[in-house]
Amino acid sequence: MFENFRLQLDRVSASGDTAVYDALDIARGVLANYRRDLPNLRKRIIIVSDGDDTSSKTPAKEVCYALQKNKVLVDSVQVGTQSNSTLHAISVATGVKYSRS
């Protein structure tokens, strides 16, 4: 299964605008309302990005605060030549342990 995911990821090409923070905020909203009957359920977003946010309307700081408030972890996988230090900081701020391979 992972090998299939990796192969599909290798075929992805990036183009256009990237609204990373808006996407995180939308996913957070969905997860915040998911299974409220299970208060100890751990909620997590895995985001694969090729670099910087270029078009979000919601500031990264606000998204990070909302993620923390809703106890949603964000694992960020950054691919390509660009690196987004803000996305990395969001992952760390939400409680994800960072390791570099």
Image (cartoon, rainbow, N blue to C red):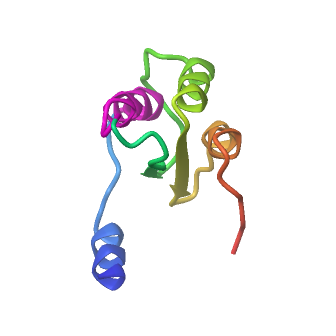
Membership of 20 in magenta stretch? yes
Above or below: residue 30 compared with residue 101: above
Q: Nearer the viewer, residue 15 or 28?
A: 28
Q: Nearer the viewer, residue 84 or 73?
A: 73
Q: How many marks?
A: 0
Question: Is residue 16 shown left or right of residue 84?
Answer: left
Q: Position of residue 86 (x, y in %)?
A: 66, 36
Q: What's the residue at 71%, 68% (across, down)?
A: 100
Q: Position of residue 87 (x, y in %)?
A: 60, 41
Q: Which residues are magenta?
A: 17-36
Membership of 35 in magenta stretch? yes
Q: Position of residue 90 (x, y in %)?
A: 63, 38
Question: Is residue 24 shown left or right of residue 71?
Answer: left
Above or below: residue 48 compared with residue 60: below
Above or below: residue 63 compared with residue 52: above
Q: Nearer the viewer, residue 45 or 32?
A: 32
Q: Position of residue 39 (x, y in %)?
A: 45, 39
Q: What's the residue at 71%, 59% (across, down)?
A: 98
Question: Is residue 58 shown left or right of residue 29?
Answer: right
